[in-house]
């Protein structure tokens, strides 16, 4: 009779590799989807693939299509205008963008990815990676005096702080991988004191900020506190690097990608970033990410390379624009399919990164012509390490009636994005009781979805 | 007459709206933000130099409060250039995340945020800047005109750090504030490195400190109105006119305690406007007031406009910059912005516009006279015309809205709730204007209320297509460019007349004042600022509508020289 295999006999390398961590990634594509081309006509397993999901067919068994999810918080506000802005801004936060004076106040909530990053992010070198294709907001008012911050960001570390995005593949690569210890199993002490000195600088600076805080009024203090939080995050990242307390994995790094130039085709730009996400997840540099293919309300990108004239936003409001809109929609779905493929190809143990992830693909609207955010396009790919069953189309019926939001396009009783986000949190091992809040500060969701949870 | 089933091309703003449009006046007040101007407290703030200041002028509302204002990327780069003497542009090489805009400007203290990504980049940049500076003999000598070793080590370090901090924090820094930074020298020595290594850490930390990255205006006494001290005013003035830190002359005026006196302020402002660094202010007017930052990302479709090429973008940008330069120096009045009978062009641009004698020009931008029936003023320059268009067509609504927002400070209300889906079977015919008017009529009064306000000035510019070229016809129909001004109903026919009507509009000078004030103080304006804005508009117009005069008026106004403090 063999002895039980005691834990202490197991070599640390093997032990680290049997437990694959869970990852979360949210991919965002702008200006909705043509829902009649997106929504499968039947539900359940083996649903008929609709036109817009054709490029995802190779991975049909690895994701669920969810239809009928709504975003009630996007409808809250004293005016209709600004719906792209509110719908994008609230997508992962499920909080109303409440600002009586729209240009000045930035007011949102913490986003799902940052909730997860706060819980699990310190187990890796980087808490999260927040990336996209466009950095700048370009001008002041993106939609009816709202700050562009809501259109340009789906990741928020708190109510007033958008995370910002990295857009240059080379910059992303350098940020994530430059400090990587060469031997993941035995991180060497920093030979040139670089990290130690950086931490020392930040400690001094944080001390100075604390002293200055006492001399400031309330609003100024909040801005300084925001700066302090940011600096603290950097300091903690460096501390993790120094003490080697984070998870490490052997990582076969490819050469660094080239610097971003104006000449880089849009498709290649997006796919290169997708490569880096897959690499970062596989190397366990981070377990949380968000990727904005473009900004909400995008009216800047041109798609001449697809034979489409005009801008995406304009096309969504053209009743004769469906054919062109479908080409653009399909382009973004294809980019998501590319990313899914890379995650699936990243093997780990006897599974792969996709299997151990929860990956969203969504947009701020369904039908963009009427700014509909009662029925959103949503794909949840990956199996959360086995907790999610995939391969289905699940429809969440809309609540009866026109909805209560100011613009009539939100209904409190629809199944909300917040319900999905809470489901995701629980699957990630984060037993939060509620997610998001409405205009009365009541939670948007206190229950989770069950249809695809094993 | 061709009858086409044409697209119901909705304006980008889904412009259907309730009856009665137009927000009318200045943006709504942020109630509670500005405590009443009950008394003024002199002094406050830190550092030596003049602290008394003059009491704020009463009767013009509360001076408002600027939120702890982070240097934006542009200001950061300029500040490093002036601090170190090397134009390193760290925000570019280290890819700082983009700054958000507030009310059209990128220096709004409420809107600028600091994320972890920002902090990572600031750290990288600080280290890179100091390493580079200390490796460059000229920059090194400017920072450290001594040797931090042997007998002189301590005094060299102390004097170097004290002087660097004075310039980096934009005020004298007392020894007790510097002491924590100086501990980094011992940290380095503790690791077996030299004092110079430690000194570099100190300098890097100073560039990471909130006193460098933000314009700190501490409020020791809550809920009063206090005058800024000389150093605080120096900082506001230099970022207003130079988008950068004060120079030594300005620091000296601050140290002498005289800067807050209006006569001295005016003298410094005039000096600063004449300095080459004032190009930064001119660039702000072009890129942010006129919004040519949107021109950079415009991509007119060459399929629709085969005569277009991307080089025209930089030419149009330069046209506006050159055009603004004499306005900024006061050689020409601000009204020239709209009604000038000249522009600045190089050969490529002149040929594109079809100007006579274009072939005689070179690559250099020179002043060219214009036939004012066709060109003249920013509303008929390519930059405005292109950035208010879609890639494949122009948008009268975007143009009308831009004018209302940037030139008249009278932005329209947003569209209303419950936008119905449109009947897609309806067909409209005619020019863009005719089709839009038919659309709005068919959708009812709900649309016409706002579009009667937003669209007319845009319709007056219909002779200019999406790449800024003149056309007589649109969609096979002759263009009708007549209309009336919103609210005042002053009639016009065509672009020349509408620009004259806008230039003569009472809202124009006050709007110029509001835009400059917004940028100068780094916050959006409120109802409390209305009396000041109106007064500035009047004084500015009386003084011949010269921009330097407006800059002086803003620089000496209570909104600039004082602040309403908050409780902690």
Image: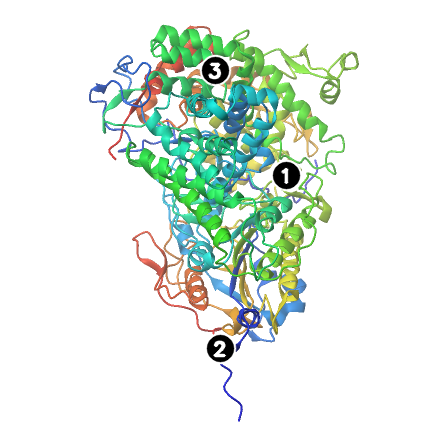
- A292 relative to B182, above or below: below
Secondary structure category for the residue under label 2: helix
The reply to whether residue A155 is in sight is no
Disc 3 residue crowd, few under 14, some 14–19, many 20+, Cα 10 Å: some
Q: Are marks 1 and 2 on the same chain?
A: no
Secondary structure category for the residue under label 1: loop
The reply to whether residue B254 is in sight is yes
Q: Quadrant of residue A252?
A: bottom right
Q: Point out the tag, 3 or 1, that comes first from the N-terminus.
A: 3
Distance, label 1 to label 2, CA atoms, is 80 Å
Residue drawn at 43 percent across, 29 percent down: B212
Residue drawn at 25 percent across, 16 percent down: B59
Subunit bearing disc 3? B
Residue drawn at 28 percent across, 35 percent down: A214
- A19 relative to B326, above or below: below
Position in image of residue A320 (x %, y %):
63, 49
Position in image of residue A143 (x %, y %):
48, 39
- The residue at which mark 2 appears reads as A7
Query: Looking at the image, is mark 3 or mark 2 nearer the viewer?
Result: 2
- The residue at which mark 3 appears reads as B247
Point out which mark residue B469 bears: none
Secondary structure category for the residue under label 3: loop
Position in image of residue B324 (x %, y %):
57, 16
Does residue A221 appear left or right of residue B323 in this picture? left
Contact check, label 3 and label 1, Cβ < 8 Å = no
Subunit bearing disc 1? B
Towards the viewer: B27 or B77: B77
Towards the viewer: B476 or A102: A102
Distance, label 3 to label 1, CA atoms, is 61 Å
Point out which mark residue B429 bears: 1
Q: Are marks 3 and 2 on the same chain?
A: no
Position in image of residue A336 (x %, y %):
62, 58
């Amino acid at each position: 009779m063999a002895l039980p295999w005691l834990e202490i006999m197991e070599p640390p390398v093997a032990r680290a590799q049997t437990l694959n961590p869970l990852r979360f990634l949210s991919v965002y594509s702008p200006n909705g989807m043509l829902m009649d081309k997106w929504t499968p006509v039947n539900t359940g397993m083996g649903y008929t693939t609709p036109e817009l999901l054709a490029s995802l067919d190779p991975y049909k068994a690895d994701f669920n299509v969810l239809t009928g999810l709504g975003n009630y918080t996007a409808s809250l506000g004293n005016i209709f205008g600004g719906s792209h802005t509110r719908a994008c801004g609230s997508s992962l936060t499920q909080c109303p963008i409440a600002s009586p004076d729209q240009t000045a106040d930035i007011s949102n909530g913490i986003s799902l990815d940052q909730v997860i990053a706060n819980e699990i992010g310190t187990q890796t070198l980087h808490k999260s990676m927040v990336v996209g294709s466009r950095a700048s907001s370009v001008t002041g008012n993106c939609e009816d005096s709202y700050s562009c911050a809501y259109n340009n960001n789906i990741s928020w570390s708190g109510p007033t702080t958008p995370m910002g995005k990295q857009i240059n593949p080379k910059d992303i690569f350098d940020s994530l991988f430059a400090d990587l210890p060469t031997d993941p199993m035995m991180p060497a002490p920093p030979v040139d004191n670089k990290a130690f000195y950086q931490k020392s600088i930040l400690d001094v600076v944080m001390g100075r900020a604390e002293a200055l805080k006492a001399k400031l009024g309330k609003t100024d203090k909040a801005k300084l506190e925001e700066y302090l939080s940011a600096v603290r995050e950097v300091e903690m990242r460096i501390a993790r690097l120094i003490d080697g307390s984070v998870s490490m994995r052997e990582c076969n790094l490819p050469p660094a990608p080239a610097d971003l130039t104006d000449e880089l085709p849009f498709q290649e730009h997006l796919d290169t970033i997708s490569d880096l996400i897959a690499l970062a997840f596989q190397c366990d540099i981070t377990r949380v990410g968000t990727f904005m293919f473009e900004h909400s309300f995008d009216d800047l990108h041109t798609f001449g390379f697809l034979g489409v004239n005009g801008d995406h936003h304009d096309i969504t409001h053209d009743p004769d624009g469906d054919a062109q809109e479908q080409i653009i929609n399909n382009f973004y779905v294809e980019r998501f399919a590319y990313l899914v493929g890379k995650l699936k190809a990243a093997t780990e143990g006897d599974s792969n990164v996709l299997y151990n992830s929860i990956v969203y693909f969504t947009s701020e609207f369904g039908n963009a012509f009427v700014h509909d955010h009662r029925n959103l396009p949503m794909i949840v790919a990956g199996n959360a390490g086995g907790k999610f069953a995939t391969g289905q189309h699940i429809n969440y019926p809309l609540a009866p009636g026109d909805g209560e939001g100011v613009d009539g396009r939100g209904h409190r009783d629809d199944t909300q994005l917040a319900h999905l986000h809470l489901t995701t949190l629980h699957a990630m091992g984060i037993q939060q009781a509620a997610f998001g809040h409405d205009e009365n500060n009541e939670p948007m969701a206190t229950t989770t979805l069950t249809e695809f949870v094993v | 007459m061709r009858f086409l089933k044409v697209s119901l091309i909705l304006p980008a703003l889904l412009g259907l709206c309730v009856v009665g449009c137009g927000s009318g006046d200045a943006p709504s007040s942020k109630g509670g933000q500005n405590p009443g101007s009950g008394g003024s407290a002199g002094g406050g703030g830190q550092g030596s130099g003049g602290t008394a200041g003059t009491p704020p002028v009463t009767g013009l509302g509360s001076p408002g409060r600027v939120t702890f204002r982070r240097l934006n990327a542009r200001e950061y780069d300029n500040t490093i250039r002036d601090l170190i003497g090397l134009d390193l542009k760290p925000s570019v090489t280290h890819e700082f995340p983009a700054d958000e805009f507030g009310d059209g400007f990128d220096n709004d203290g409420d809107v600028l945020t600091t994320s972890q990504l920002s902090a990572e980049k600031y750290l990288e940049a600080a280290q890179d800047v100091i390493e580079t500076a200390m490796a460059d003999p000229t920059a090194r000598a400017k920072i450290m005109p001594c040797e931090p070793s042997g007998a002189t080590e301590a005094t060299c370090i102390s004097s170097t750090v004290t002087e660097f901090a004075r310039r980096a924090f934009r005020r004298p820094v007392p020894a007790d504030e510097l002491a924590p930074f100086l501990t980094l020298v011992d940290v380095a020595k503790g690791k077996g490195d030299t004092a110079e290594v430690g000194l570099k850490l100190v300098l890097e930390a100073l560039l990471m400190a909130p006193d460098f990255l933000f314009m700190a205006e501490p409020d020791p006494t809550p809920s009063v109105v206090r005058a800024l001290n000389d150093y605080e005013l120096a900082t506001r003035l230099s970022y207003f006119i130079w988008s950068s830190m004060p120079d030594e002359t300005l620091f000296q005026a601050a140290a002498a305690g005289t800067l807050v006196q209006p006569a001295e302020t005016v003298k410094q402002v005039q000096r600063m406007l004449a300095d080459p660094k004032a190009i930064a202010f001119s660039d702000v007017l072009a890129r942010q007031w006129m919004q040519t930052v949107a021109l950079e990302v415009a991509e007119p479709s060459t399929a629709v406009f085969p005569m277009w090429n991307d080089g025209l973008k930089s030419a149009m940008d330069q046209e506006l910059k050159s055009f603004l330069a004499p306005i900024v120096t006061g050689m020409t009045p601000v009204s020239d912005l709209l009604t000038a009978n000249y522009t600045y062009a190089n050969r490529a641009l002149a040929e594109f516009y079809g100007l006579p004698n274009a072939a005689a020009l070179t690559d250099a931008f020179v002043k060219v006279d214009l036939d004012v029936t066709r060109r003249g003023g920013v509303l008929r320059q390519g930059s405005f015309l292109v950035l208010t268009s879609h890639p494949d067509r122009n948008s009268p609504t975007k143009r009308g809205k831009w004018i209302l927002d940037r030139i008249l400070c009278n932005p329209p209300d947003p569209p209303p709730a419950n936008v119905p889906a449109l009947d897609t079977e309806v067909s409209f015919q005619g020019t863009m204007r005719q089709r839009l008017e038919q659309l709005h009529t068919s959708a009812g009064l709900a649309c016409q209320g706002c579009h009667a306000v937003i669209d007319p000035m845009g319709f007056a510019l219909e002779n200019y297509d999406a790449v800024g070229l003149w056309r007589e016809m649109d969609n096979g129909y002759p263009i009708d460019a007549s209309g009336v001004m919103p609210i005042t109903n002053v009639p016009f026919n065509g672009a020349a007349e509408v620009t004259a009507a806008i230039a003569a509009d009472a809202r124009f000078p006050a709007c110029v004042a509001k835009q400059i004030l917004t940028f100068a103080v780094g916050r959006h304006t409120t109802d409390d600022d209305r009396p000041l804005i109106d007064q500035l508009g009047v004084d500015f117009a009386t003084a011949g509508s010269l921009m330097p005069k407006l800059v002086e008026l803003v620089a000496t106004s209570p909104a600039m020289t004082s602040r309403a403090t908050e409780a902690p």
